[in-house]
Image (cartoon, rainbow, N blue to C red):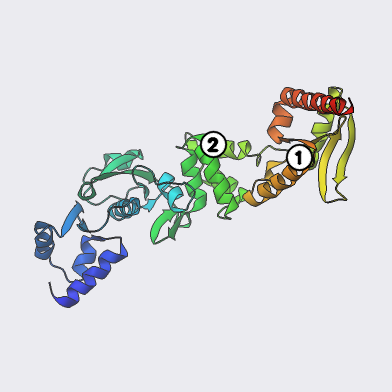
Amino acid sequence: MKGLTRSRVGRVFECHDGLARREELLAAGVSTGEIRAAIRRGEWVMVRRGLYGLANWAASPRRDLVAACLATGGAASHASAAWLWGLLEKAPDGPTVTVAHGQRPLGERKRATIATLRPHTLGLEGLGRRATVHYSTDLAETSISHWQGVPTTNPLRTLVDLAGEAPGDVVDAALDRALARGLVTVEGLVAEAQRVGRHGRRGPRQLRRALARRGFLGAPPASVLESQLLRLLAANGIEVVATEVAIDYGRYRIDTEVEGNVFVEVDGYAFHWSPEQKERDEARRNALRLGGYTVLVYGWRAVTREKRRVVEEVLAAQWLALARRADGGA
């Protein structure tokens, strides 16, 4: 292999984490015989027919994912895309890609799996890995981004796909991260779920449930939530002393004070979801508690669906506050 050709080949491999498709190598001036010779010498490995890798390149989840994209012509998706976007803390056990319906991966002779749209595994023999391949009829160009040099489904599509496979707590955490980093909006997620939703598809339905769990769908506005809390307290004989209470010369504001110097706050998740807002809220409440105030906090789910627990806890807090006051007075 001549020096100029070797330099070109090196750049091809470097662009793809030590991987290169056959047509790229041929375009760089490498002959079929030279490809075979490099494999015989152990310098290259054949990942799949038509896809080669440098034998001395370090293994990594990212390289496995790039190999799956090159082998299929698809894009990182599902948990792999979520990891690439930073929505999951660690890479999944194996790469997952989504391919446009009818597109055939390298070395794939059978088209039966493509026709059914069912996901299947694809061997990356030279890397000792297997990839999961999904086929899609609605993988529009607008659904694909290039992130960190890898073709990947955009954050909206990624969350829809992840919701169809991952446990609820994993989806909730990924959703929180995506919103906190400004990768998606609630409106965008709802629109994407509507766009790709179809009968029998699990992802859009599960994403809507995740949004509901976080209080973005079906949750009342903050003012309505506070009114519901007041009605709940009144219906159970708990006297409200004041609302919108200013403490420490207006430095802090608490939603509701009930008899016994007990304070109750409600969080509408749509207004308190970001890590920054949560940190500010907790700092304020910690300061109040250290100042001797009893502060109870409830979200929309507790106020609307766990009413008995809310009432029992408020009553218990009142009893403890009165007991402490009596002990101090003795």
Q: Nearer the viewer, residue 149 or 201?
A: 149
Q: How many marks?
A: 2
Amino acid carrying mark 2 in the image: Arg
Relative horizontal placement of residue 313, taking residue 249 as reference (left or right): left
Q: Quadrant of residue 313?
A: top right
Amino acid carrying mark 1 in the image: Arg
Residue identified by numbered label 2? 205
Residue identified by numbered label 1? 289
x and y percentages locating residue 275 in the rendered image = 62, 49
What kind of element bears circle 2? helix
Q: Which mark is residue 230?
A: none
Relative horizontal placement of residue 53, taking residue 222 as reference (left or right): left
Q: Residue at x 38, y 43 (%)?
A: 92
Q: Residue at x 37, y 43 (%)?
A: 134
Relative horizontal placement of residue 265, taking residue 38 as reference (left or right): right
Q: Quarter holding the N terminus?
A: bottom left
Q: Nearer the viewer, residue 24 or 58?
A: 58
Disc 1 + disc 2, Cβ < 8 Å = no
Q: Residue at x 66, y 48 (%)?
A: 279
Mark 1 to mark 2: distance in Å?
Answer: 40 Å
* Label 1 neighbour load within 10 Å: few <14, some 14-19, many 20+: few
Q: Is residue 185 visible?
A: yes
Q: Nearer the viewer, residue 45 or 196?
A: 45
